[in-house]
Amino acid sequence: GIEAEVLDLRSIRPIDENAIFNSVEKTGHILVVDNGWTHINVGSEIVARVSEKRFNLLKSPPRRLGLRDVPIPSTRALANLAYVSQAEIIDAVSEQIGLKLEIHWDKVTQIDDVPNREFKGPF
């Protein structure tokens, strides 16, 4: 019974502020999920612009999710600890809307961050 609007920006320069602001106007929330680091990235800029220009539309504090503040991992095990998981996204959404959402762990996928299985190192 919960719907989310997903906005996939095709360009960040120029950034489509109107698309972002229209989404915030419809939903009253913003959760930015970025595959870059959480600090000093595009997600931070989006949250800053919404906070500066459309703060009055927000029903909950804006949220950002991204890489942990660590070097990019070189193994799948470490990648699963560094990148944003589906469970973290579900938790962030539940926090924003004030409703505890059930995580179906059988549907949560792990990261497979190996571009070429022939590659064996060096690590």
Image (cartoon, rainbow, N blue to C red):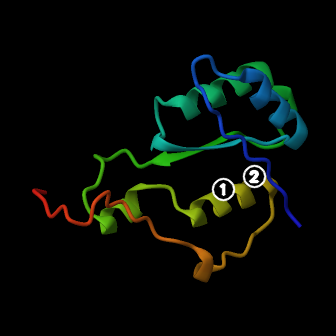
The numbered disc on residue 96 is: 2
Q: Can you name the residue that lies furthest to the bottom here?
A: 106
The numbered disc on residue 92 is: 1
Task: Determine whether 120 is above or below 39 in the image.
Answer: below
The quadrant of the image that shows the N terminus is: bottom right
* SS at badge 1: helix
The image quadrant that residue 9 belongs to is top right
Do residues under tags 2 and 1 come within 8 Å of each other at their CB atoms?
Answer: yes
The quadrant of the image that shows the C terminus is: bottom left
| Residue 119 pos. (x, y %) | 18, 61
Task: Determine whether 98 is above or below 108 in the image.
Answer: above
| Residue 91 pos. (x, y %) | 65, 62
Mark 2 nearby-residue class (10 Å; few <14, some 14–19, many ≥20): some
* SS at badge 2: helix
Task: Determine whether 34 is above or below 82 in the image.
Answer: above
What residue is at 74 percent from the left and 61 percent from the top? Answer: 94
In the figure, is residue 7 to the left or right of 113? right
What residue is at 59 percent from the left and 83 percent from the top? Answer: 106
In the figure, is residue 13 to the left or right of 120? right
Mark 1 nearby-residue class (10 Å; few <14, some 14–19, many ≥20): some
Q: Amino acid at mark 2?
A: Gln
| Residue 81 pos. (x, y %) | 39, 62
